[in-house]
Image: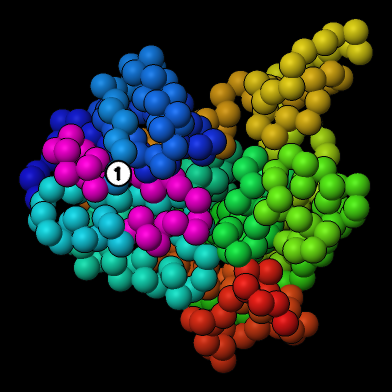
């Protein structure tokens, strides 16, 4: 592999909502070009290319196959931003190319969650390491501006005199996903627990870990989880899903959980128990996506709420406008008092996350978050799912979760 690159040329795999969110964040990232995109949908990759070029991030070319993009000679690293059920297949293609063409591909980054099961996550890690390329796990909340700033203050000012924090709470809620595959347990891998608690458990673990410490400094002990169907299985809303998302999303017959709660216990380097409490929901109605974070120590605390923004806009009932998400992600109304995220990409961490990944890959360095972190997140989530299914606490030293599949993801449910 060559030494430091002046510019990292990336290829994007996928052209849906999250791919476009990442693309827009790249405007504020230096030393990067978005040189290619592969999507199975020609229309989507065409629109993505036009957008990349209009933003000055190209020249971007649309490719009709992943193999064609990887072999174009235009790509140094790829971002896996496809739906969960095709991520492993995508990684297998990347692995085959990298092994056959040593040095042609520098790195790969994968959007959360890394996989749908621990078995799949382990295979993702095995494939990327056998390919001999750098790898990064795209968990944006670790790079959110509030998380970075709050964590820095607590560990520099409070911990030295008052000791390590012992509790982190993380909540994420919105009214439901954008695309049909998210709602299908067999494709997505679960419901809201897999889709959103992957953020919560990792940002909680991150906030409780001292900067510079390996994540393994917190020893995973146990997980206690619960799930529920609060809204979308009700006939009125199940029928709405069927109408809006298509025949494969029938929540009268095959729902996935729209609410989940979890408690994860770790042991810190001092031998004390520390806890991450999580709650996630697709059944929240408010201005839009709400993320709440708390950290507690013996003599200090930190809190953050994404909807308590500095900028708010009010629109009366006489103001009419098309439905959209121009003020905040998962926006639920175009009237009333609305919080506005001045820069969603920075506030939610996408800008800093992509800046970090680009610089690490460009310099040939290991990024802060890798596939190993993504695999550990899946281990925790599988523990929470199994706990919810069996109604008991899961102790990780006593459980082999490798082949566990969440109930809602099984083709034939018990």
The segment highlighted magenta reads 67-91
The one nearer the camera, 26 or 39, is 39
| Residue 412, x across and y down, in percent | 66, 77
Q: Nearer the viewer, residue 414 or 12?
A: 414
Few, some or many residues within 10 Å of mark 1 (<14, 14–19, 20+): few
Residue 166 appears in the rendering: no
Residue for point 78% across, 31% down: 332
Quadrant in the rendering for residue 223: bottom right
Left or right: 280, with 3 as reference point: right
Q: Secondary structure at mark 1?
A: loop
Residue denoted by label 1: 65
Question: Is residue 147 in sight in this rendering?
Answer: yes
Against 136, residue 38 (above or below) is above
- Quadrant containing the C terminus in the rendered view: bottom right
> In the rendered view, does 400 fall on the left or right side of 291?
left
Instruction: Identify the residue shown where x is 70% and y is 46%.
Output: 246
* Whole-percent x, y for residue 19 in the image: 46, 37
What x and y, as percent, mark residue 397? 54, 88
Scheme by which the image is coloured: rainbow
Rendered position, 46 above or below 132: above
Q: Residue at x 68, y 54 (%)?
A: 248
Q: Residue 180 appears at what percent x and percent y?
A: 64, 47
Residue drawn at 61 percent across, 55 percent down: 195
Q: Is residue 78 magenta?
A: yes
Q: Nearer the viewer, residue 94 or 340?
A: 94
């Amino acid at each position: 592999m060559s030494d430091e690159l002046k510019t990292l040329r990336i290829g994007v795999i996928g052209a849906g909502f999250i791919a476009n969110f990442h693309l827009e964040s790249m405007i504020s990232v230096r030393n990067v070009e978005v040189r290619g995109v592969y999507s199975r949908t020609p229309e989507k990759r065409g629109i993505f290319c036009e957008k990349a070029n209009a933003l000055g991030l190209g020249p971007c070319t649309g490719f009709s196959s992943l193999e064609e993009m990887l072999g174009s000679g235009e790509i140094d690293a790829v971002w896996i931003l496809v739906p969960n059920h095709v991520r492993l297949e995508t990684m297998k293609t990347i692995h085959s190319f990298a092994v056959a063409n040593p040095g042609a591909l520098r790195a790969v980054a994968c959007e959360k969650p890394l996989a749908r099961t621990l078995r799949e996550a382990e295979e993702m890690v095995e494939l990327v390491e056998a390919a001999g390329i750098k790898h990064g796990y795209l968990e944006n909340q670790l790079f959110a501006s509030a998380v970075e700033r709050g964590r820095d203050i607590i560990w520099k000012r409070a911990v030295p005199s008052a000791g390590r924090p012992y509790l982190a709470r993380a909540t994420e809620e919105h009214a439901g996903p954008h695309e049909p595959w998210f709602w299908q347990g067999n494709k997505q891998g679960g419901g809201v627990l897999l889709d959103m608690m992957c953020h919560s458990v990792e940002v909680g673990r991150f906030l409780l870990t001292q900067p510079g410490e390996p994540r393994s400094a917190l020893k995973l002990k146990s997980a206690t989880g619960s799930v529920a169907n609060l809204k979308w299985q009700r006939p009125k809303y199940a029928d709405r899903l069927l109408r809006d998302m298509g025949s494969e999303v029938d929540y009268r017959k095959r729902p996935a959980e729209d609410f989940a709660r979890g408690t994860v216990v770790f042991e810190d380097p001092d031998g004390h128990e520390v806890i991450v409490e999580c709650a996630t929901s697709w059944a929240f109605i408010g201005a839009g996506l709400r993320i709440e974070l708390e950290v507690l120590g013996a003599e200090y605390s930190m809190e953050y709420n994404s909807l308590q923004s500095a900028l708010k806009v009010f629109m009366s009932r006489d103001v009419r406008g098309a439905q959209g998400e121009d003020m905040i992600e998962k926006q639920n109304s175009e009237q009333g008092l609305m919080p506005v995220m001045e820069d969603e990409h920075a506030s939610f961490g996408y800008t800093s996350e992509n800046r970090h990944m680009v610089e690490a890959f460009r310099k040939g360095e290991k990024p802060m978050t890798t596939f190993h972190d993504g695999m550990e997140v899946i281990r925790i989530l599988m523990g929470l799912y199994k706990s919810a299914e069996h109604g008991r606490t899961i102790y990780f030293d006593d459980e082999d979760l490798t082949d566990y599949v969440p109930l809602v993801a099984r083709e034939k449910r018990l």
